[in-house]
Each structure stands twice: as structure tokens, then as C-alpha cells.
Image (cartoon, rainbow, N blue to C red):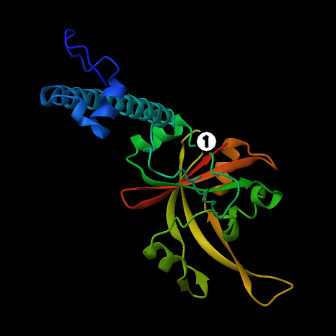
Amino acid sequence: MEKKKNIPFNPKVNFGLNILLAQVAPHFYTNEELSQIEELCQSVFQETKSHFISQNIVKKEKMDNNKKRHCSSDEGRMSCGERRVKPKIIKEKESPQSPKLPIHVMDKITKLNGSNVRYLMCKKLFKTDLNINNNRLSMPLKKIKCDFLTEIEKKILNTKEEDKPLGLEVIVLDPLFREFTMSLKLWKMPKKSKMHSTCVYNLIKNWRFLVSQNNFKEDQKLNIWSFMVNGKLHFLLDD
């Protein structure tokens, strides 16, 4: 290969051919020309490498941004690496949910310094509940939705005096928040078909007076709540 000596050597001209010849026939070049080809090769290699790295960085940033946007839309609570698991629904023993305590009722309980508010049951008034001669409100134990008694109160109610259940003095508030002092007793009533008995809580004493003051009717429904005031058990009837 004959070179033109009057033209300055430029390794960029026919760059690919120069690289190939420099590898297979270096005797065609002077040492200085070979150095120029090598420097140009290294420069081109560095530029190509930098361009490739920058492309990867941009691509990675786009992927990260997409991932962040996806995570932020996931209710803002769960981290990106976490697995979304549908929460289990824990069902209560009783399928009907307890009614929400009205604000004005809660305010009254708060003014009385009441605590440990519990929903007991929805009581449908029967003819026997309104009978003046019976003078009691029955609350079957199987209908009660929670354990509202302390251990001491349970012990008192399970105690008998002269073969009669011992009563526990309580305060009952009617829907107008009027207070009536009553006695809570636990009665065990035998069933006709089986030998075992069923337990019923009864509010007695002054019940007939509360009924007359409120003009309760048969089939009327009352939500019954319990709460404590200075260690004394209270009941609230909400219609």
C-alpha cells in the first residue's frame, strides 16, 4: 500500500480500515501513526461506553419512577415490596351488629361519670313483661350479647338465701333518663322437654312503676345497655 506523504495522516479517515490494517499489517504505518490509531480507538471506546452507561441509567430511572407511581397509588399504605393480602373479616358470635349508642345517651352517661358501657340486647316487650302482677323485665341469658357482670356480681347472683336467689341492687334509667332503683336476679327456669334449666336475668322491684311512667306497649323494642358508676351497675333502656 502506497501512501501519499504530502497529506497529513488522519486516523479518522477510513477509521475502520486503519484499525484492521494496524492489527494485520502494522508495517504499513509508522510508530507515530500506530499511536494515533490506538489513542483514537481508546477515545471512541470510552465515548461508546459512557453513552451505553448513560442510556442504562436513564432506563433505570424511568423504571424506578414508574414503580414509585404504582406504589403511591396503592392506597398510600402498603410498601412496594409487600404482598397485598386481603384482610380477614372476623365475625362476632352474634351476626347482628350492636347499634351505635346515640350521642345524647353517651353524653348522659358521661355526665354520670359512667364507664364500661356495654350493649346487652334488643328486648321485645311481651305481655308477661307488662303484666302488673309479674312486676319484672326478663332478659334471657342466651339473648345477652356480652359478659357485663364482675366476678363479685356473678357470685352474688349465684347465691341463694332461704332457697331464693339473692338480688343485686342496680339503677335503671328509662328513655327519659329517669332513675329507678331495682333488683337484678338470676332465675333458673326448668324446661318442660329437658332436665336442664335455662337462665334468665330479671329486673324486679319498681318495674311496674317504670312501665306506667313510660306507657310501654306490647311488641315494643328496647335497646338495653349497661354501664358502671362508682362501682354500681346501671342499666339504660333506649327506645
Q: How many marks?
A: 1
**Residue at 76 percent of width and 54 percent of height:** 124
**Residue at 57 percent of width and 53 percent of height:** 225
Q: Amino acid at mark 1?
A: Pro
**Residue at 64 percent of width and 60 percent of height:** 91
- Residue 92: x percent and y percent? 63, 61
Secondary structure beneath dot 1 equals: loop
Q: Can you say which quadrant of the picture contains the C terminus?
A: top right
Which residue ends up furthest to the top in the rendered image?
6
Examine the rendering and report whether any part of residue 196 can be seen: yes
Examine the rendering and report whether any part of residue 53 can be seen: no
Q: Is residue 63 above or below residue 231?
A: above
Which residue ends up furthest to the front in the rendered image?
2
User: Would residue 210 appear left or right of 21 to someone viewing this image?
Assistant: right
Q: Is residue 120 above or below residue 34?
A: below
User: Would residue 189 appear left or right of 145 to someone viewing this image?
Assistant: right
- Residue 189: x percent and y percent? 73, 79
Q: Is residue 4 above or below residue 87?
A: above
User: Would residue 33 appear left or right of 176 to someone viewing this image?
Assistant: left
Q: Is residue 43 above or below residue 186?
A: above
Q: Which residue is mark 1?
A: 175
Which residue ends up furthest to the right in the rendered image?
193
- The residue closer to the viewer here, 60 or 230, is 60
- The residue closer to the viewer here, 119 or 29, is 29
